[in-house]
Image (cartoon, rainbow, N blue to C red):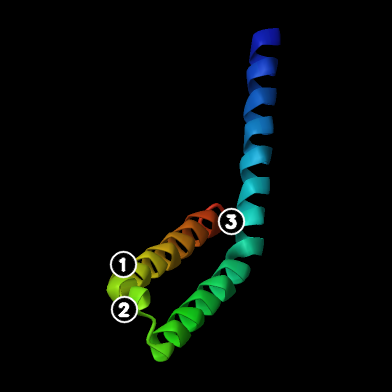
Amino acid sequence: MARDAILKAERTDTRTLVLEAAKKVLRHEAKIADIEKELVQSHLQRLHKGTVETFETSSIHLELLTSLRWINHYTAQMVESLSV
C-alpha cells in the first residue's frame, strides 16, 4: 500500500511539473514570436545595406528563423492539448 501511495504521489508531482512547464511555454510563446520578428527585420535591414555576408547566408538565416517559428508553434500546440 505504501508503495502505491508513493507511486501516486510521484505521478502527481510529475504532472504538476509538466503543467508548470507547459504554462511557462505558453507565457513565452508571444515573446518568442516577437523576437523572431525582430530578427527578420534586422536581417532585412542588413540586406538593404548590402552587407556581403548577409547575402551569402540569407537563405540559411531565413530557414533557421522559419524553423524556430515552427518549433514555437508546434510546442505551443502540444502544450495547449494538455488543457493547461
For mark 3, what is the residue? 83
Q: How crowded is mark 3: few (under 14 residues within 10 Å), some or many (20 or more)?
A: few
The foreground one among 65 and 12 is 65
For mark 2, what is the residue? 55
Q: What residue type is labelled 2?
A: Phe
For mark 1, what is the residue? 60
Q: How crowded is mark 2: few (under 14 residues within 10 Å), some or many (20 or more)?
A: some
Q: Going 44% across and 68% down the picture, which residue do you hit?
A: 69
Q: Going 39% across and 85% down the picture, which residue do you hit?
A: 47
Q: What residue type is labelled 3?
A: Ser
> Looking at this rendering, what residue extends furthest in the front direction?
52
Q: Which amino acid does label 1 sit on?
A: Ile
Q: Nearer the viewer, mark 2 or mark 3?
A: 2
Q: Is residue 44 visible?
A: yes
Which circle's residue, 2 or 1, is located before the other in the chain? 2
Is 54 drawn above or below residue 68 in the view shown?
below
The foreground one among 49 and 31 is 49
